[in-house]
Each structure stands twice: as C-alpha cells, then as structure tokens.
Image: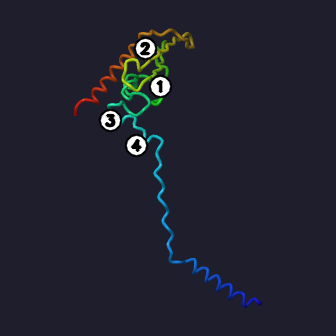
Amino acid sequence: MNWSLKMPTAGAVGLALGLAACGIVEPAPPAPEPVKQGLFGPGGIPLFQLNQQDRRAGGEIGVNAFLWRATLDTLSFMPLASADPFGGVIITDWYALPTTSGNERFKLNVLIKDQRLRSDAVKVTVFRQERAGVEWRDAGANTATGTELENAILTRARQMWLDANAAP
C-alpha cells in the first residue's frame, strides 16, 4: 500500500473512533461517600457545651465535667503546665505567692478519679520548694493545703451542678 492510501484510511478510522467515543450514554453518577464518624462525634469535642442529658450525667469527657470545670476555675490563679480532660489530670507550673518575696513556690497535681460527683473523686497533691541561694530545694508541703483545695473544688463543683440542674 502506498502512502497516499494509508493517510485517508487512518483518518477515517480515527474519525470513526472519535465519534464513537462521544456517545449519548451518560456515565452513572458516583455513589455518595458514606458519612465518616469523627473521632469525637458529630458535634466535635463537647467539653463545655452540655445539653440537658449531659448536665445530669456530668458531661462526655473521661471524668466528671463539673469537677473538671471547678478545678480549672479554682486553680485559675496558677499557670497550667498540662491538662488532660480524658485522663482527669491537671498539672500546674510553679507559682510563687506574692507574699513570699519569691523565696517559696508551689506546684499542684490534681487527679480527678471518677465520672461521678463524689468527695473522693478529686485528689490534690501539693509540692513546695524554697530558694536556697540561687537554686530551689524541695521542702515539705502542708497536707492541709491539699485538703483545703480539694474542698474548694468540691464546693465549686457542687454549686455548678446545682446551677445546671435548677428548674428553668
């Protein structure tokens, strides 16, 4: 076959294939993707927006939401180093009281151990250091301080619970 016959034949075949590819059959629409569940549910992380059912149960975090919020509220004067609402652990950074002239500082570890609002559900550990020259040395902390903070947290949590469960 010579060249002059090959070109028109190839062109005709290409035109036929091109027209066949432009058919009137429409492709099926893609299937909708299934809705993926988020890691924390459809509403995000519900730490501080409690609905009516959550108010009675104390929230959807790993610990009692009233104890959690009361602890953050009670310790708001201290800088936080770490806070884990699912494990119920709050660790403050070192804090020097204004009355100690910077020679004494405190650090708190708070553990919320239950999802129920109970007196034994919160444990506060107090650490105390004193300045000795240019370095800080561990000093014994008064155990009554931890108990007083636990009572303050429980009182605040109880008030929050009463406010949330009051008749509208």
- Indicate the position of residue 57 as horizontal and vertical percent values: 35, 31
Question: What amino acid type should be assigned to the residue bearing mark 3?
Answer: Gln
Looking at the image, do the residues carrying marks 1 and 3 touch, with CB atoms under 8 Å apart? no
- Residue that numbered label 3 is attached to: 53
- Residue that numbered label 2 is attached to: 146
**Looking at the image, is mark 3 or mark 2 nearer the viewer?**
3
Tag shown at residue 152: none
**Looking at the image, is mark 1 or mark 3 nearer the viewer?**
3
Question: What amino acid type should be assigned to the residue bearing mark 1?
Answer: Val
Distance CA(mark 4)–CA(mark 2):
36 Å
Sequence-first tag of 2 and 1: 1
Mark 1 lies on a secondary structure that is strand
Sequence-first tag of 4 and 2: 4
Looking at the image, do the residues carrying marks 3 and 2 touch, with CB atoms under 8 Å apart? no
Distance CA(mark 4)–CA(mark 3):
15 Å
Which residue is rendered at x = 48% and y = 56% of the image? 33
- Residue that numbered label 1 is attached to: 89
Distance CA(mark 1)–CA(mark 3):
24 Å
Looking at the image, do the residues carrying marks 4 and 2 touch, with CB atoms under 8 Å apart? no
- Indicate the position of residue 14 as horizontal and vertical percent values: 64, 82
Q: Is residue 112 visible?
A: no
Q: Tell me the crowding category of disc 4: few under 14, some 14 to 19, or many 20 or more residues within 10 angstroms, Cα based.
A: few
Tag shown at residue 43: 4
Which residue is rendered at x = 34% and y = 35% of the image? 50
Mark 2 lies on a secondary structure that is helix
Distance CA(mark 1)–CA(mark 4):
24 Å
Sequence-first tag of 1 and 4: 4
Q: Tell me the crowding category of disc 2: few under 14, some 14 to 19, or many 20 or more residues within 10 angstroms, Cα based.
A: some
Q: Tell me the crowding category of disc 1: few under 14, some 14 to 19, or many 20 or more residues within 10 angstroms, Cα based.
A: some
- Indicate the position of residue 16 as horizontal and vertical percent values: 61, 83
Judge left or right: residue 157 versus residue 106: left
